[in-house]
């Protein structure tokens, strides 16, 4: 999944392809609280990152998509957060109690969400779940439930797994229902292809712990 970030420092050559990049990484996740996510070996996909080691790359197929990051301060800090209109995968069973002993079958269950509003430290990020369109493997549509709009708070931002490149399907020309997206299959976890999608039930107390309404 696309969770490794880099900054393109210089295009050295087009033909043959060769660029100078610097990888972004983060050694902590203190911006979201006291959870030791990075220390337990999990990959952090949003938050604060810093420019680390550089590399010369001569093959283009390692890249997935462009990110909307913001560089802040003189220390080289880059802020990457879900942005309105983007599609992200979230860990379905995520818990503050996850650690190095959490089984793979618990970790590798995902749901797709559309980002509705920008991240703030006070409220977190506003999202709505996406549901797979029947008969398609990569086409998802916005949930029609009136109570589907939720907030993922700051302390649970590590629930985001990765951004999923997507293409909005205009219903007037595509023949699809309103608010449909075609998602990049390379960024869709395998479990989403092989398993039947369960109905999204927000009355589930576990789900209520990670989706919060703002006041």
Image (cartoon, grey):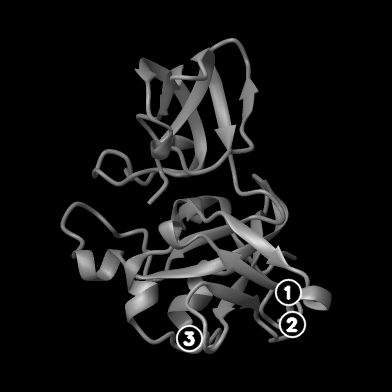
Quadrant for the C terminus in the image = bottom right
Cβ atoms under marks 1 and 2 closer than 8 Å = no
Q: Which residue is mark 1?
A: 179
In terms of depth relative to the viewer, which is nearer, 181 or 154?
181
Of the two numbered discs 2 and 3 in the rendering, the one whose residue sits closer to the viewer: 2
Residue to which mark 2 is pinned: 175
| Position of residue 61 measured from the top left corner of the image (x, y, whole percent) | 40, 39
Residue in the foreground of this view, choosing between 197 and 134: 134
At 62% across and 23% down in the image, what residue appears? 71
| Separation of residues labelled 1 and 3 (CA atoms) | 25 Å
Q: Residues within 10 Å of mark 1 (few under 14, many from 20)?
A: some
The residues tagged by marks 2 and 3 sit, at their Cα atoms, a distance apart of: 34 Å
Residue 78 horizontal/vertical position (percent): 56, 26
Q: Residues within 10 Å of mark 3 (few under 14, many from 20)?
A: few
**Tag in front: 1 or 3:** 1
Label 1 and label 2: CA atoms lie apart by 12 Å
């Amino acid at each position: 999944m696309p969770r490794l970030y880099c900054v393109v420092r210089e295009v050295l050559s087009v033909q043959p392809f060769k660029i100078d990049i610097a990888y972004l990484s983060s050694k902590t996740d203190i911006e979201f609280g006291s959870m030791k996510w990075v220390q337990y070996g999990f990959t952090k996909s949003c938050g604060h990152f810093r420019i680390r080691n550089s590399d010369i790359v001569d093959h283009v197929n390692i890249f997935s998509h462009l990110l909307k990051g913001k560089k802040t301060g003189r220390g080289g800090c880059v802020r990457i957060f879900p942005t309105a209109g983007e599609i992200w995968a979230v860990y379905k069973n995520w818990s503050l109690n996850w650690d190095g002993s959490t089984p793979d079958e618990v970790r590798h269950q995902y749901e797709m969400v559309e980002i509705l509003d920008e991240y703030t430290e006070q409220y977190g990020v506003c999202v709505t779940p996406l549901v797979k369109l029947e008969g398609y493997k990569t086409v998802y549509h916005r949930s029609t439930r009136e109570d589907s709009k939720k907030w993922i708070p700051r302390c649970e931002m590590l629930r985001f797994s990765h951004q999923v490149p997507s293409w909005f399907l205009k219903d007037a020309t595509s023949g699809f229902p309103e608010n449909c997206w075609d998602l990049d299959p390379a960024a869709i976890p395998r479990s989403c292809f092989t398993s039947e999608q369960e109905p999204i039930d927000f009355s589930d107390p576990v789900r209520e712990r990670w989706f919060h309404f703002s006041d």
